[in-house]
Image (cartoon, grey):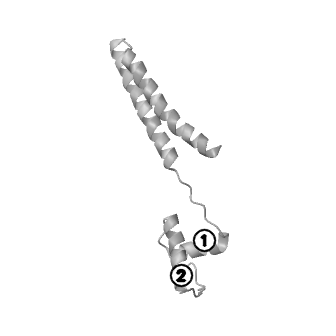
Amino acid sequence: MADRTRPIRIEFCVTEQEKKLIESKMAQLGTRNMGAYLRKMAIDGYIIKVDYNEQKKLAAAVSRATTNINHICRRFNSTGHFYADDIADLKERQAEIWSPLREVQKKEL
C-alpha cells in the first residue's frame, strides 16, 4: 500500500436497496467506477452531467452549411456563375441551424 496515491481506506455498509440506488445513479451518470463515484460524491456532494446532444446537432448543421458554402465558392470561382439552386440550398442549411437554436431557446424560456 505504500505506493498507492490513496493509501487510506474508508469502508461503509449499505442495504441491497441502497446499493441498487447507488448503481442506478451511477448508470444515469454513465460511470462504472464505484470508487471514483463515491469519492466524488463524498468530497463534492454533487455531480452535474451536461447533455451536449443539442450542441452536437447544432455543430453538425453548421458543418454541413460550411461544407456547402465551400462547394458553392469553388464552383463560383471556377465557372463565374452563382445559381438559384445554390441560394435555396444555403437557405435550407440556414434553417437547419436555426431549428436547434429555437428548440434550445424554448426549453430555456
Residue 17 bears which disc, if any? Answer: 2
Q: Could you say where residue 73 lies in the image, as x and y percent from the top left?
A: 40, 21
Closest to the camera, between mark 2 and mark 1, is: 2
Identify the image quadrant of residue 47.
Answer: bottom right
Q: Quadrant of residue 39?
A: bottom right
Residue at the top extreme of this rendering? 80
Q: Residue at x 56, y 78 (%)?
A: 5
Looking at the image, can residue 73 be seen? no
Query: In the image, residue 8 lies at what x, y percent?
Result: 60, 85
Q: Badge 1, how many Cα within 10 Å: few under 14, some, many 20+? A: few
Horizontal and vertical percent position of residue 69: 42, 26
Is 92 left or right of 44, judged from the image as shown? left
- Please state which of residues 39 and 61 is positioned toward the viewer in this rendering: 61
Q: Badge 1 is on which residue?
A: 40
Classed neighbour count for the residue bearing mark 2: other residues with Cα under 10 Å, few (<14), some (14–19), many (≥20): few
Q: Which mark is residue 10?
A: none
Nearer to the camera, 36 or 13 = 13
Q: Are marks 2 and 1 in contact (CB under 8 Å)?
A: no
| Disc 2 residue type (three-letter) | Gln
Residue depicted at 54% across the width and 75% down the height = 22
Q: Position of residue 67 (x, y in %)?
A: 40, 31
Rendered residue at 48%/45% (across/down) = 56
User: Mark 1 falls on what kind of element?
Assistant: helix
Q: Residue at x 60, y 45 (%)?
A: 107
Q: Where is 20 relative to 56, above or below?
A: below
Q: Amino acid at mark 1?
A: Lys
The correct choice, above or below, for 2 with respect to 37 in the image is: below
Tell which circle, 2 or 1, labels the residue nearer the N-terminal end: 2
**In the image, residue 59 above or below residue 22:** above
In this rendered view, identify the residue nearer to me: 36 or 21.
Answer: 21
Q: CA distance from mark 2 to mark 1?
A: 21 Å
The image shows a total of numbered marks equal to 2
